[in-house]
Image: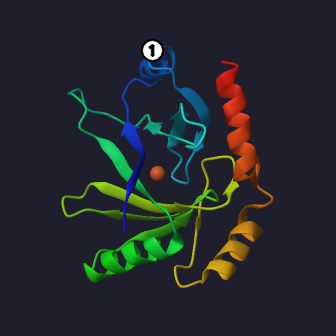
């Protein structure tokens, strides 16, 4: 099993200042933005065409101190079998988790022993406009899971093969 770094989601106080800094100073693109089911807004940023988001920002901070408040850290697996191994591990620790597919991922979310949010996910073969999500059945085999995912997300905005999305992002990055 191996984990590779994907993205972090930050709780932010000053939306405009943070977005200005990350886009103008650090060179990120805003790839998507919108409300999650709770109504909270999320803004996605990336510089890497292979990653829909390297950073997410949720304007939800209310404290005045230095930030120590990320929402979750996320790790990618290379296969569904690897993800299933991690699910078994989490279940073995008696940690409850939420399976959520964002259309472009099959993810699980849980909290570590000190209540930091963690996401572990495997990529689907597709891209779809974010944010969005649906609960997926972790007991489905690969074929059934792919069929369910296609049926669930194929009519959502921006749905396409992942390769088409990556090619479009490469072009956008090259002409920026
Ligand atoms: Fe995430």
The residue sitting at 23% across, 37% down in the picture is 68
Residue at the farthest top position: 25
Q: Nearer the viewer, residue 111 or 163?
A: 163
Q: In this image, 50 relative to 58: left or right?
A: right
Q: Nearer the viewer, residue 36 or 172?
A: 172
The residue sitting at 57% across, 27% down in the picture is 29
Residue 105 image point, x, y percent: 57, 60
Q: In this image, 64 relative to 170: left or right?
A: left
Q: Nearer the viewer, residue 85 or 23?
A: 85
Residue 58 image point, x, y percent: 44, 38
Residue 124, picture quadrant: bottom right
Q: In this image, 28 relative to 68: left or right?
A: right
Q: In this image, 35 relative to 114: left or right?
A: right
Residue at the farthest right position: 155
Task: Give the image's coloring scheme.
Answer: rainbow
- Badge 1 is on which residue? 25
Residue 106 image point, x, y percent: 55, 65
Quarter of the figure with the C terminus = top right
Callout 1: SS: helix
The residue sitting at 25% across, 32% down in the picture is 67
Q: Is residue 75 above or below residue 113?
A: above
Quarter of the figure with the N terminus = bottom left
Residue 109 image point, x, y percent: 41, 63
Q: Is residue 74 above or below residue 30?
A: below
How many marks the image carries: the answer is: 1
Q: Is residue 43 above or below residue 90?
A: above
Q: Is mark 1 within 8 Å of ligand 1?
A: no
The residue sitting at 60% across, 48% down in the picture is 131
How many residues crowd mark 1 within 10 Å: few (<14), some (14–19), many (20+)? few
């Amino acid at each position: 099993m191996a984990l590779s770094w994907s993205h972090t989601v930050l709780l932010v106080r000053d939306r405009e200042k943070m977005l200005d800094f990350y886009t103008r100073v650090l060179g990120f693109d805003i790839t998507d933005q919108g409300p999650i089911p709770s109504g909270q807004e999320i803004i996605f940023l990336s510089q890497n065409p292979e990653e829909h988001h390297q950073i997410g920002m949720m304007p939800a901070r209310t404290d005045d101190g230095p930030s120590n408040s990320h929402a979750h850290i996320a790790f990618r697996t290379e296969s569904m079998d690897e993800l299933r191994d991690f699910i078994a591990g989490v279940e073995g620790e008696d940690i409850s988790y939420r399976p959520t597919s964002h259309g472009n991922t099959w993810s699980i979310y849980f909290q570590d022993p000190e209540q930091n949010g963690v996401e572990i996910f495997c990529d689907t073969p597709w891209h779809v406009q974010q944010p969005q999500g649906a609960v997926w059945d972790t007991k489905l085999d690969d074929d059934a899971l792919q069929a369910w995912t296609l049926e669930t997300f194929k009519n959502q905005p921006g749905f396409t093969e992942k390769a088409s999305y990556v090619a479009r992002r490469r072009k956008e990055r090259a002409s920026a």
